[in-house]
């Protein structure tokens, strides 16, 4: 397996990507990850229901926090990436005055819910954890519908999460500090295919 190098990536700047994204139709959601432009799939009904389940849990456990959907973040080293997280958890008022692509200093957790498309493995399980860790987001929560699991990444250091815990749907999942929420994921079993 040959490692990827800069010479194999398209030569697009972050500024060019943001200009392209501004002119994309509303039905197209673009991301700029590891120097590549990616089209993020639109969520299906189960994806939306899982988001709402998580929103309710977060509001009950931590009314001082807000779980915002579809948030654009400046990620990766030197904030050169542009990821559109399925959700971000921030303190109440944490996005006030922010533009479409926010810095991540107030983000406590980024959330991705897998979609059924060919890029899910690379995007949600490899590139997004690295980009979120490089942006020093304390917790990355991956709700993986492909294998009915919840994966919690935390302790970002040197562009990688030092700790990862994978649990099946139905388990009690502890989201570590600074989130400090325990999720009873029994309800996610109804989304297992």
Image (tube, rainbow, N blue to C red):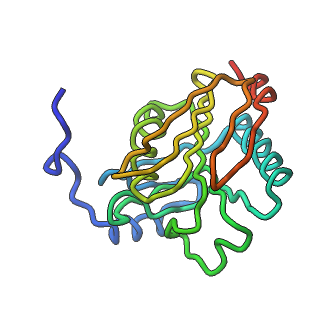
Q: Residue at x 61, y 39 (%)?
A: 113
User: Left or right: where does residue 145 sit relative to residue 11?
Assistant: right
For the residue pair 114 and 148, the one nearer the viewer reads as: 148
Vertical placement of residue 40 versus 88, above or below? above
Q: Quadrant of the C terminus?
A: top right
> Residue at horizontal 81%, vertical 29%?
187
Q: Toward which corner of the image does residue 184 lie, by quadrant? A: top right
The furthest residue to the right: 60
From the viewer's perspective, is 118 left or right of 147?
Answer: left
Residue 84 vs residue 133: left or right? right
Q: Quadrant of the N terminus?
A: top left
Answer left or right for 101 relative to 134.
right
Q: Position of residue 18 (x, y in %)?
A: 41, 68
| In the image, farthest residue toward the left | 7
The residue shown at (41%, 48%) is: 38
Instruction: Report x, y in % for residue 97.
Output: 62, 81
Name the residue rendered at 62%, 31% in the picture: 150
| In the image, farthest residue toward the bottom | 97
| Percent coordinates x, y for residue 192 in the rendering | 70, 21
> Going by the picture, which residue comes out furthest to the top?
193
Q: Is residue 50 above or below residue 32?
A: above
Position above or below: 172 against 36? above
Nearest to the observer: residue 141 or residue 84: 141
| Residue 50: x %, y % from top left | 73, 38
């Amino acid at each position: 397996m040959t490692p990827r190098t800069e010479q194999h990536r398209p030569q697009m700047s972050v500024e060019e990507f943001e200009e392209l994204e501004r002119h994309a139709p509303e039905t197209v959601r673009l991301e700029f990850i590891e120097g590549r432009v990616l089209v993020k799939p639109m969520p299906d009904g189960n994806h939306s229901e899982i988001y709402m389940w998580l929103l309710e849990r977060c509001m009950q456990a931590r009314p001082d926090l807000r779980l915002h959907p579809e948030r654009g973040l400046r990620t990766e080293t030197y904030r050169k990436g542009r990821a559109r997280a399925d959700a971000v958890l921030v303190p109440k008022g944490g996005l006030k005055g922010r533009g479409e692509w926010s810095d991540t200093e107030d983000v406590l957790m980024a959330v991705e819910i897998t979609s059924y498309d060919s890029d899910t493995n690379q995007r949600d399980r490899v590139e997004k954890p690295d980009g979120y860790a490089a942006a020093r987001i304390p917790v990355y929560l991956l709700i993986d519908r492909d294998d009915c699991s919840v994966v919690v990444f935390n302790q970002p250091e040197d562009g990688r999460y030092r700790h990862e815990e994978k649990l099946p749907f139905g388990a009690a999942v502890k989201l570590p500090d600074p989130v400090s929420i325990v999720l009873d994921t029994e309800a996610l079993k109804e989304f297992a295919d």
